Image (tube, rainbow, N blue to C red):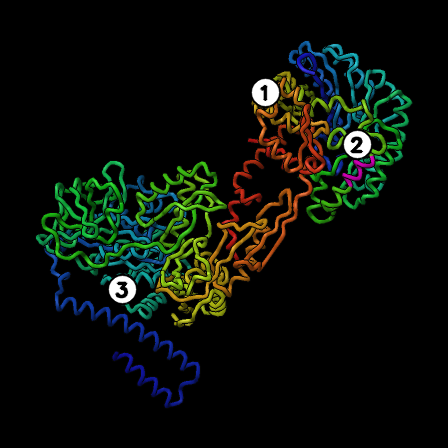
Amino acid sequence: MREGTIGLYVHFPFCLRKCLYCDFPSYAQKDHLMDEYLKAIKVEVDHAKAKINSRRIKTVFLGGGTPTLYHEEELAQLLDYIKHSCLISDDAEITIEANPETLNPRKLKVLMEAGINRLSIGMQAGQDRHLRALGRIHNIADVERGVDWARKAGFENINLDLMFGLPNQSVDEWLESLGCAVKMGVEHISAYALIIEEGTTLYELVEKGRLRIPPEDVERDMYHRGVQFLKSQGYIHYEISNFAIPGKECRHNLLYWQNKEYIGLGSGAHSYLQGHRWSNYADICKYIDRIYEYGNGIEQCEEISLSNQRFETIMMGLRLNSGVSKKIFRERFGHGLEYYYGDVLENLKAMGMLIETETSIYLTAKGMDLQNSVLLHFME
Amino acid sequence: MLFCSLLIIIWMMDFAIGKMNFIHIVHYRTEFVKLITASTAVISYRLNKFYATIFKGETIGMSNARQDKIRNFCIIAHIDHGKSTLADRILEIAGVLTERDMEKQVLDDMDLERERGITIKSKAVRLSYKDDGEEYILNLIDTPGHVDFAYEVSRSLAACEGAILVVDASQGIEAQTLANVYLALEHDLEIVPVINKIDLPSARPDWVKKEIEDVIGLVAEDAPLISAKNGIGIEEVIEKIISSIPAPTGDEDAPLKALIFDSFYDNYKGVIAYIRIKEGKLKVGDKIKMMATGKEFEVTDVGVFKPFLTSVPELRAGEVGYVAASIKNVRDTRVGDTITHADNPAEEPLPGYRKVNPMVYCGVYPADGARYEELREALHKLQINDASLSFEPETSVALGFGFRCGFLGLLHMDIVQERLEREYDLDLVTTAPSVIYKVVMHDGTKLDISNPTNLPDPAEIDYMEEPIVNAQIMAPTEYVGAIMELCQERRGTYKGMEYMEETRVLITYELPLNEIIYDFFDALKSRTRGYASFDYELIGYQQSDLVKLDILLNGEVVDALSLIVHKDKAYTRGRGIAEKLKELIPRQMFEIPIQAAIGNKIIARETIKALRKDVLAKCYGGDISRKRKLLEKQKEGKKRMRQVGSVEVPQEAFMSVLKFD
């Protein structure tokens, strides 16, 4: 997906409540800004058109926050607006993230008709007590119901987000959560290790000793057994934390992992185009102000040197179990991987971290577990 | 002596009439001891002067009219008692610097010195002062106070006739004060006590005066009470200088004898030597000879410091100034050496010259092996102005190519390290400091070893000796127990204890130098809540049961971590180091065994577990830059690591492994 194509991300920063573990740019109790925000997005679309040019948008991702906090008509209208401003592929993958609390049959139907063909629901855990502990506003039952409605509305591509390594979570509970998700017959599962991010409520609680997270050994156990389980259920483990029925990999996220280009709209959104990365203000008001003043909400922009581009390609590519394609790398950078990283590859292979085939390089299970250390070898 | 006899009589009388009990006896005993010490000091001091004056030895003469208007003096004090501030004030009054020129503590002119509040190089300043219509020339020689630089201090003292002793009114006499006073007394200087910091609420000037009289044996009744910080009493000090400190003497027409008490390298003039003319005179064009090395030079400039270099036509006996003679190397102007004329040389050099020897060594390696040349350049450049720094190339299996550097002491070592890192922007790995051990082999060969890796096979060693120092520690009496405990821990031998007054005590211990070499001072401070002060001097070598302690990482000896320790200490040290390394070395992709060994025997072990998880669970568009930067930072951090075999070891590990207490 080079020159002719691009991905589009739109951010919706509003939430009903802030979950204890969340460090995304999302906010509760800012509903009064929702209308203004939507208007600003449209202004941003107008100005972004020039950057997108005549490229076809192959993937659209409406993320957040909780995009489904908006009324379905508003969302449909926005999508329409984008379609009329830019070229969206007929077979584009268009995803919306949803919180089960904010779903209802009608909404799902309208969204389906508007062109959204993939639904990503934040399930997080298969036990209500864990959901409570994380500060989620829904139950397991809500998720099951939401998936049911989505099927009825016609969605054939549903993802569930799940987390392991939760405070007081046992390995069995984790497997139970996965089982629950699989039972719902979803096409895609994202299974993340809980990251205690600085600045979140969970961080404080753990720091104060009020919550204990599972030790490293247990956490790794959860991960590896989870992977085993999902594979046994027919899911392809295609990225460190992502599993899909064959053919149902998330094409939008693949753009990131293949280090391809995308435009991000909305507060806190990131973009990558022509060797530059830039991001918008995370603060909603600042974003809106800047949009009206400059037509864009850019807070900072960075030029990515060729050597950094190479590194990023490897950094992201090795997250995929299929790794980095030698051919694509050579086409992009002019020389093959051996040219830049000959010794490194030999070293890593000797350490049992990496496997090299004729067509690609990818990490072993051990290499995946210690990926950061492995990546340092690729850095000058 | 009369006093003592009287005291004994009174004592016996009191005892007889039953006035005394045990406490009294103790009190009298300490008073008695103090008196003996004081009397001895005073009497020997006075006798010396008496003898000198009566018999008019070679070095004592009469001052001529010109010399009569000169006073050469220095300021001695314990750290932080106000030496530099007083120096500043004296300069101010003599109008040497304008308000604008004044930067805090001008005589300490390097940043580093300002930070540590210490003087590293001595300086001299010539001041003019009008007293009673007469114009006097006052030469203030600023001296380093630290024990590491004792030799330089002693040569600076030799250039003076008097010394102002600054004592903090709230702290009283400290270990360093005493050390410096004895040094000054040895050089026959007239000591003018001055009591500083009287502005502080805790100031006890009368108590301090009494201390000075009792402990040192100087008359302190008329000691000026000053506050250097606030500029109070400074004039009184200057007047005391003029009235109490004798004028210099020396025959202008005798063969030249000029004492070098310091030198530095100037880019334009070459090496500039600070000199005190003892006999004769010196001017531009003269051919001079260095008596210690025999080297000859032609004088290109003579002058004085005001404080900046100011040329004069001639320097004559009794004066302090500088000489420049196209000298390329500071090693040609040795501190303590005598300069004389090539064609009319003096018969004997001035006394006191001594070759300076390093006391402490450590290995200095560039963190990045590629910068070895830069390190060498930097050491060369430092050496240009530091004749006491020595270095020679050395290699280590663990650390690569580097240097074994010799220093006068720990402070000297710290300073050089910081200068290398700061002024030359070098990232260094330094090994733990070590002393010079004397090794005697069975076949009679004698070796001096400072690098543990060079220690020969124990089977061939007959015996070993280690350097011993005499340490004087001064602290409030409530810490006596803690101090004695610390010294015993460090294999010290108790030598004695003296009460300064009811609440303070001076404890003397003989300690092996390698026991105090790293963190003794810190340990002392922490056990005495900062109240103790400490000074030491090398007294010789003593046979000792020493062994080589090796550290193995992943089964391989890391030569840079090897230590020579006393066999009684080997186990605790070995265990301590293994534990410390376990803390400092980050987990790596495989398990790392750490072992401490003596010869083939493993005496301690620890294990660092392998890393199991080092991966970011989520990484999408917005995370890419942040993640890359994080990895970049980690990579930078790794640069501070040394690859030792297959293990990555942080630089800090090599040095901090010895921090215990």
* Disc 1 residue type (three-letter): His
- Read off the residue under disc 3: B222
Please, what secondary structure does the residue beneath circle 2 have? Answer: strand
Q: Disc count in the image?
A: 3
In this rendering, is residue B517 above or below A203?
below
Instruction: Report the residue at 56% width, 56% height from top.
Output: B596
- Label 3, label 1: how far apart the Cα atoms are: 87 Å
- Read off the residue under disc 1: A335
**Magenta highlight range:** A222-229
C-beta proximity under 8 Å, tags 3 and 2? no
Indicate yes or no whether the magenta region holds residue A224.
Answer: yes
* Disc 2 residue type (three-letter): Asp
- Residue B477 place in picture, x, y as percent: 45, 69
* Disc 3 residue type (three-letter): Asp
- Residue B624 place in picture, x, y as percent: 65, 28
Q: Residue furthest front?
A: B443
In this rendering, is residue B370 above or below B582?
above
**Nearer-the-camera pick, A34 or B643:** B643
